[in-house]
Amino acid sequence: MSSILVAEETLDPNFVPPRLVRRDAELALIVGRYRSALSKGLTYHQFLTGGIGSGKTALARKVAQELARIGPLNRRPILTHYVNCWRRSNDRLVLLELLRAVGVYLPDKGYGVPDMLDTLEQGLRKTPAHRIVLLDEVGALVRQETRLIYLLTRSGEVGLGSISLLMVSPEDVLPYLDAASRSSFGSTHRLALPRYEAEDLVEILSYRAGLALRPGSYSPDVIEQIASLAAPTGDARFALELLQGAARYAEESGSAEVEPEHVRSSKGSMMPTLSEAKLEALGDADLLILLALSRSLRGPRTRTPTGRVRQSYASVAEEYGRAPVSRVTFWRAVRSLELEGVIQVEPSTPGRPSRLGMDEVPAGLLTTLIEERFSARRRRKS
Ligand SMILES: Nc1ncnc2c1ncn2[C@@H]1O[C@H](COP(=O)(O)OP(=O)(O)O)[C@@H](O)[C@H]1O
Ligand SMILES: [Mg+2]
C-alpha cells in the first residue's frame, strides 16, 4: 500500500541523492583540489566539518563518486574507500577495514598494527592507484590517540603509495592531532559547511520529496511546515525523517495527500515537546489560546492569522466561563508559548498579517487533550 511513498528507499540515510542542493560550490571546490593534486602525482588531504545534518557525509561521498568518475589521473585510476570511524574507533579496526578494501580478509584478533601495515602495503601494490580514504566521524578515532592518520598522511614515505585522506567530523579535531599530521591540513585544506537555513531546507525537502513521493501527494505548504520545524537546528536528516514520518502517517490514514496534521503526528512521535506534564503546568489563558489555535488547525491549514485566533480565543473563553484576557496579555501569552517551543509565531509581512502555527502534536489530539482537561477541572469544581 504505497500510494504516497513511491520510492521510499531514496529516503534511506545511506542513499546518496544524484544531486546535492545548494552544495555545488563546495563540491566543485573540493573535487578541484584533489584533482589538481592527483594529476601532478601528489596526494591531498581535506578536513570537512559542519553541524549535524549539514550534509557532510553526503558531500564527502559525492566527492568520492565524482573523483572515481573523473577516472585516471596521471595514468592511475582513482579508488575510494569509506570508513565510518564511529563504528571502528581504533587504528586496528580501521586498518582491518582498509585491508578488506584491498581484498585481504584478516581475523579480528591476532595481528598487530605493524603486521597489518605490511599486509596493506602488499595489497596496495597489486593495484597501483590513487586511493581516497574517507574517514567519517573521525573524532572517534582521534580521541584514541591514533598513529594511523599520521602514517596515512605520509603514505608515500612509508611505502603505502598514493593515499589521500578526506576526514569528516562535526567537531574540529585538528587540535587533537600531532603537529606533523596537523601540518597536512593547512588552512586551505579545511572547509566548514554553513548550516542550512529554512529556505535551504525547503529546497532540499522539495527535491527529495520529488524523488521519494508521488507527484501531487504533497503541497508547498507542507514542505514549508517541515522546513520550519527543522530550521532551528538546520538538520537536513531531521527534516527528511519528518517528511518520511508524515508520508507514512498519511498512507496509514488512507489519505491521498500529506496534510499538516500528518506532519504534526510525525513531529509528535519523534520529539514530544508538548507532554501532558507541560500542559498541566499551563494556566487557563494559555490553554484556552492553545485550544482556539488547535481547533483552527484541524483543517487543511498549517497556520492561522493571529487576529483570528484571538477572536476565537474570546469565544472559547466564553464557552468555558472565563473572562478573556486583554490584547496585551494575549500577546504576552503567545510569546511565552513560543519561547516554550509549543507554537510558532510567523511575523507579519507587508501583504500579510502575522500567523500562528502549532506543529508539535496533531491539532486534533491537542484539542481533545485540552477539552478533557477543562471538563475535568469543571467536574472537580462542581
Ligand atoms: N544539499 C542536500 N541535498 C539533498 N539532500 C541532502 C543535502 N544535504 C543533506 N542531505 C541529506 O540529508 C541527510 C543528512 O545528511 P548527512 O550528509 O548525513 O549529514 P551529516 O553527515 O552532516 O550529519 C542525508 O540523508 C542527506 O542525503
Ligand atoms: Mg555524517
Image (spheres, rainbow, N blue to C red):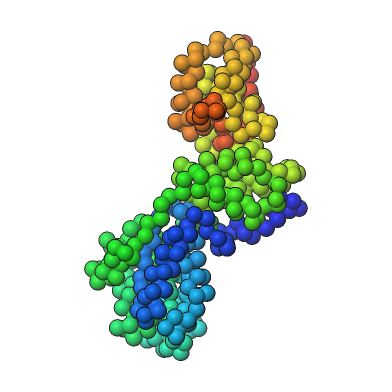
In the visual, does 8 lie left or right of 74? right
Q: Nearer the viewer, residue 71 or 376?
A: 71
Determine if residue 97 is in view.
no
- Quarter of the figure with residue 56: bottom left
In the visual, does 232 lie left or right of 206? left
Question: Residue 161 at what x, y percent from top left?
Answer: 37, 84
Instruction: Give the residue drawn at x 23%, y 68%.
Output: 179
- Name the quadrant of the C terminus: top right
Q: Nearer the viewer, residue 36 or 142?
A: 36
Q: Nearer the viewer, residue 373 or 334?
A: 334
Residue with the most extreme left position: 179
Q: Nearer the viewer, residue 208 or 296?
A: 208
Question: Residue 37 at what x, y percent from top left?
Answer: 37, 75
- Quarter of the figure with residue 6: bottom right
Compared to residue 95, the image places residue 318 above or below, namely: above
Compared to residue 130, the image places residue 54 above or below, namely: above
Instruction: Give the residue drawn at x 46%, y 89%.
Output: 126
Determine if residue 204 is in view.
yes
Instruction: Give the residue drawn at x 52%, y 18%.
Output: 285
Question: Residue 295 at what x, y percent from top left?
Answer: 64, 26
Compared to residue 379, the image places residue 189 above or below, namely: below
Compared to residue 238, the image places residue 229 above or below, namely: above
In the visual, does 189 lie left or right of 236? left
In the visual, does 113 lie left or right of 324? left
Instruction: Give the residue drawn at x 37%, y 67%.
Output: 46
Question: Residue 38 at what x, y percent from top left?
Answer: 39, 77
In this rendering, the count of numbered labels is: 0
